[in-house]
Structure formats: structure tokens, C-alpha cells
Amino acid sequence: MLYRELADYIEAKYSLLTQHTDPETALPPLFARQQVVIDLIAQIYQQLHMLSANHQQQYKRLLRTFQVALDLQEHIAVSLHNPDEVQKLVEQSHAEAVIRYNAQLVAARLRVLADDILYHRQPERFNMAVALEALEKIAQRHPENPVGQFCYYHFSRIARLLRTQRPLYRRDVMADNQQRLSFWQALRSYCSLKSAALRNAARLGIMLAIGSSLGLVFNLPKPYWILMTVMFVSQNGYNATRIRIQHRAMGTLGGLVIAAATLQFNLGDKMVLMCMLVVTLAAYLVLRKNYGLAMTGFTVTAVYTLQLLSLNGSHFLVPRLVDTLIGCMLAFGGTLWLWPQWQSGLLRKNAHQALERDQDALRLLLQTNPQPAALAYARMRANQAHNALFTSLSQAMQEPGFNSSYLSDMRLWVTHSQFIIEHINAMTILARDHYMLPPTLAQRYLNDCEVALQSCQQRLEYDSPGVIKPIMATANDTPEQPGTLMERHLRRILFHLGVMHTISSVAWRQRPKHGIWLSHRLSEEAK
């Protein structure tokens, strides 16, 4: 799945190269794809820890494949924020067709590797030297344009990874395996009133208790269907639960209508069993992508199961619908009123954590001779923190009763945060290749970045306007001033932080005035 998502990501990124000039329309789809990739990487990290892959010989090839995917994500996710230069190069040459062709070759190879992983096949030889030569010629003919050199550098690294199937450098992805909480610390954390796990368990327990009581009070024939519905539709967020409820209710209604119509035909048992097998198989095939359609098939199968067992399947059509609706209403009410954790209220906390991760990554990047493994881990943590922020924003925009102006400003804030993440990704590659700054210059940029980051954090923490004056003189410099590539990335980061600080001054005055936002400082929320 990770390799397939990487293929879709690079194909979408370079398919409309000249049309990705407006950040408002071009970036959100790419952000969503990158979010899926980072979520899959985090999920694989957890699975590798559960498998103890560093102790098992048979997992070494799988671990190496995952490390290759990490390097691929690093080079695919890097962006060049020069739409004018891209347009200029496209007008002067046939660069768009060449870059798109390279991206399609990479995407096709990634899909082949995904199938090889799934079916345990050894990958065949791969070579894209001809496509890279065409890209290299464009870079040589237009040395003044950085787009050609940028694309050739990253595509050549991607081609090397796909050809050798070896990571670019050695690292231990299981290094944090020993950093686990002790049993009592983990138990105390889970039992805290601030624990999301405890809140979810209490919310689910109360909903199940109410659903069971309603089944007894109304003397429903199959009251456990209420409990099953509550269990299946309850999700972590409001929007996910709402969508699951809609799919469950509409799928159940459609399945009951189909079952009621087909029960009139009086089919034989063999024909009924064969149809049930086909319908169940089709439902499982579409379960991941279309839950409502799958529920239609499962409902038909459930009704016909009762028909085969007791010859009274038609008697349970209305009770099944009633049980499903009761379960959906209970799940929706529990999500709204039982310890709701609105993502709008978590935006400030997640934004603060994203800035902290950015600061940790920049400290490592501007050190003398940083370790590649530490750089990769810091980069991944920064990406994950930004992904948590982007997820909160996406869910908050679907929640009821929140300030749309505030969320609109936050969307722009998150966009500039994404730019910073992409600069950190690019700087990680440069630092690993030893494109470093002199110590004095690196320290000066680090001081400027830390002042800018801390000013943004203080703007998040203090609500009243004018408490902290931003001290970011370098943020107003032109990002494209002459200098090394590392310096230009740092100047762009300072520029984006300056814009984020300005946006924060407007956004926090428009924040919701209820719930978690009643506390004025993040330190009070942590208590």
C-alpha cells in the first residue's frame, strides 16, 4: 500500500507541472496524498515493532524494503517553490514532457514493486538511464534555471533506489524500540481523565448500556443489533462517525428493501446459499472503499440467514431497521455530548507541537556533522507532527458550529507550515550529502530560526494581542538572495514563519469562545 501511494503521489505531483502554480488549488490535494503516505509509514513502524523485525531473519528483506520506501518518500516529497522558474523552463524547452515521462516511469515501477511485495516475487532489473539522460540534457542546456538541476538530482536518486533496492544510507529504524513506558507509567497514563483511550472506553460503555436498556424496555426481538451498530459506527472523530452512520443507515435500508423484494420469489435453498456466497464476497471486496454498499450486501445476507434458520426472515425487516436507527442515533449523540474532543479546539495544541518538531529538526540540521539516522528520525517526527495538524484541520472543517473565518485563517497557516516541512525535507538531503554551512553562519541562522519559531509559539500561547512583539528582522529578507542552497532554504523558512506569525495575530482573535478555548494558555490546557 505504501509503494502504491508513493506511485500515486509522484504521478499527481508531476502530471500537471505548469498548473500547480496556485497554492490554494494545487497544494491541498498533494497535502492529502502526503498525509496518507506519512500515516502508512507510522503504521508500518508500529507493525515492525510488534513483529520485532530486528530479531527475525525472515523480516530483513521486508525491513530493507521499508527503508527504501522511506528514502523514496524523502525525495518524492521535496518541492521546488519556484512556479515562475518552472513556467520559464517549460516555455524554453520540452521539460514538461520529459519530467512527466520520468514521473510515469517511476510510478509504474513502484506499482510493479508493490505487486512483487504482495506476491513474494523477486523484482526484475530496472533501468531508466535514457529518461535520465534527457533530463540531464535539459539541466545542462539551462544552467541558470534551478528546476532542471532539481529534477535531475532527485529523479537520479529515485532511479538509484529503484535499481539497487538498497537504502541510500544505513540506519536503525528500530532504535526507539527501547523507549517504551513501563507498565505502571503506561497504566497511569491510560487511567488519567485526560486520556483519550479512557474517554473513548467510557463513551462506548455508556452508549452500549443505554442501547441494551432500550432493547429491554421496548422488548425488541434482536436487541443485540443495537449494540453491534454502536460498535461498528463509533469512530474517533465527529466527521468519521457521521459518515459511517450515514453509510450504515442507508446501506441497511437498501439491503432491507432488496431482501423484502426477493423474499417473494421463494427460491430454493441451494440457489439462496449460492446467492448469499456471491453477495458476501462482493460486499467484502468493496468494504474498505464503500461501506454503505457493503452494508447493503451484509443486510441481505443477514435476513436470508434468518429465513433459512427459522423461515421467518420477513418478520425481522422492520426490527432490524429500528435497531440500526437506534444504534446510529446513540452513536451520534455520544459523539456530540459524551466528552467530545473537537478538533477545532486541538488545532492550537497541534500547531504548537508542529513548531516544536520543526525546531528540533533545524537544531540537528545546523549542527556540525549531524548523524544521518538522527536527521531521518527528526525529519519524520516533523512530518508526523504536521500531519496531525493537517488532520485536525481537515476534521475541524467538518465539525458543526465553529468559526469559518478562524478555520480559513488556520488553513493558510497550515499551508505555510507545509512549506516549512518541505524545506526541512530538502535540507535533510543536503545535510546528509555534507552541504553544510560554516559554523558561525549556521549558528546565526539557527538563532534567527529559534527566535522566529518561539515568537510563533508565544503567539499561539498568549491570546491577548500585543503581548509578544515578533523579533524576526531576517524574515523580511528576500528568500531568493544570492547564497548557497541551504541558505535559501533557511531564508524561505524565516519568511514563512513571519507570515505565520502575522496570520496568528488575526486567527487567534477569531477562535471559538467555548470548550477547550476558554483556557487562555496552552499550559493551562495541559493541566
Image (cartoon, rainbow, N blue to C red):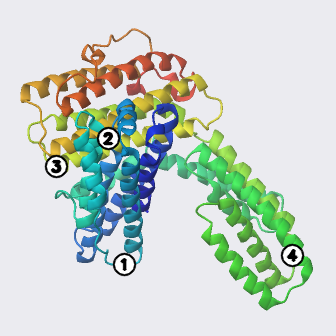
Numbered badge on residue 372: 3
State the separation of the CA atoms marked 2 and 1.
Answer: 33 Å
Along the line of sight, the residue nearer the viewer: 263 or 146 = 146
Secondary structure at numbered mark 3? helix
Give the mark nearer the N terminus: 1 vs 4: 1
Q: Residue 50 lies in what quarter of the image?
A: bottom left
Q: Give the class, few, some or many, for how many residues have Cα within 10 Å of label 1's Cα (few <14, many ≥20).
A: few
**Percent x, y of residue 172:** 20, 58
Q: Is residue 1 above or below residue 369?
A: below
Kind of residue at disc 1: His
Give the mark nearer the N terminus: 2 vs 3: 3
State the separation of the CA atoms marked 2 and 3.
Answer: 15 Å
**Which residue in the protein does label 1 denote?**
120
**Which residue in the protein does label 2 denote?**
382
**Percent x, y of residue 375:** 20, 45
Tell me which residue sits at (32%, 69%) in the image: 51
Tell me which residue sits at (51%, 29%) in the image: 516
Q: Which quadrant of the rendered structure holds the N terminus?
A: bottom left
Give the mark nearer the N terminus: 4 vs 2: 4
